Amino acid sequence: MSPSRFGDDFQVGEIYRTQALTVTETHVVNWAGLTGDFYPLHMDREYAAGTQFGERLVHGPFVFALAVGLVALAGFGGDAAIAWLGVDNMRMLAPVRIGDTLRVEVLIKETRATSNPRKGVHIWQYSVLNQRDERVLTFDYQLLLHLRG
């Protein structure tokens, strides 16, 4: 079966945007249960109130996972991906609080050939933005994609 989209369909400099999602306490509690990360900054209201943030924060790895999910749900990659190769340059730029609404902008940052003319490597730069359009997380997502060849 042939993919519906190919790496050749994406041009360096293009930007894609996802829908937004509001992070709830349920997200935070479920993430802690799935990962075992019950750090008090995320789970203990009294502890968090005494920190510089004054309230509980959302787990950074959850924000990363949510970004990946929002891009997948958006569907602009179609089934072009063969494999995820990794992530580079990940930076948490601002805290995410319960109740923040997040969306993702993806910049097609780089494309390069491989030794196989039917496969290419792409770097997509993800920027996670909150409801105030502040960047809260950025990273370079590296993918192996189908090419037309």
Image (spheres, rainbow, N blue to C red):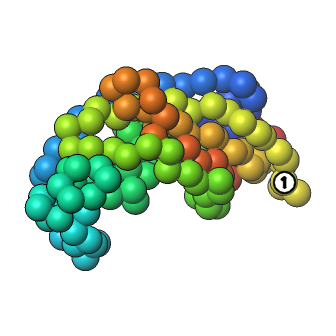
Q: What residue did someone put label 1 on?
A: 114
Q: Quadrant of residue 24?
A: top left
Asked which quadrant contains residue 126, the reply is: top right
Up-down relation of residue 49 to residue 136 (above or below): below
| 133 horizontally vs 38: left or right | right
What residue sits 20% from the left and 50% below the top?
Answer: 55
Residue 69 spot, x, y in % from top left? 38, 46
* 120 vs 106, nearest the viewer: 106
- Taking depth in this image into account, of 110 and 10 the one nearest to the observer is 110
Residue 122 image point, x, y percent: 71, 45
Please tell me which residue lies in front, 7 or 56.
Answer: 56
**Rendered residue at 40%/59% (across/down):** 61
Mark 1 belongs to which amino acid?
A: Thr
Q: Is residue 19 above or below residue 66?
A: above
Locate residue 63, reporting x and y percent.
38, 50
Q: In the image, 3: left or right of 63?
A: right
Residue displayed at 45% across by 29% down = 134
Q: Could you say where residue 62 lies in the image, as x and y percent from the top left?
A: 34, 56
> Tag 1's secondary structure?
loop
Above-or-below relation of 76 to 63: above
Front residue of 72/38: it is 38
